[in-house]
Image (cartoon, rainbow, N blue to C red):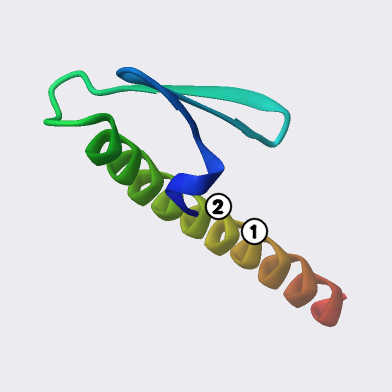
Amino acid sequence: MSLRDWDIVGGVALRQVNGQQITVTAGSFTSVEAAIKDWEAREAVRQRQSVENLGRLVTVALNRIVRS
């Protein structure tokens, strides 16, 4: 992800992700750019965990098919 993907107006940044509007404000960060980088880092972790969970689910399903 990149700052180019965000619409930044003042202290607010907006972006569409999977059909949902994401709004990020500077809040406790020194700038809205720092808040965006934090959100993107947390989103990357969330996505990785989601893919890992899906992988485990597929592995369990395939193992059950093999055993049956």
Q: Which quarter shows the C terminus?
A: bottom right
What residue does disc 1 label?
A: 54
Residue 33: assigned label: none
- Up-down: is 33 above or below 58? above
Whether residue 58 sits left or right of residue 65 in the image: it is: left
Task: Check disc 2 and give the amino acid type.
Answer: Ser
Whether residue 44 sits left or right of residue 56 in the image: it is: left
- Up-down: is 67 above or below 55? below
What residue does disc 2 label?
A: 50
Q: Residues within 10 Å of mark 1 (few under 14, many from 20)?
A: few
Compare residues 43 and 37 and report the one nearer the observer. Answer: 37
Residue 59 lies, in percent from the top left, at: 68, 72
Residue 29 lies, in percent from the top left, at: 15, 29
The residue sitting at the bottom extreme is 66
Look at the numbered discs 2 and 1 and tell me whether their residues touch, using CB distance below 8 Å. yes
Q: Residue at x 74, y 76 (%)?
A: 63
Residue 33 lies, in percent from the top left, at: 29, 38
Q: Residue at x 30, y 18 (%)?
A: 11
Residue 31 lies, in percent from the top left, at: 19, 31
- Up-down: is 61 above or below 26? below
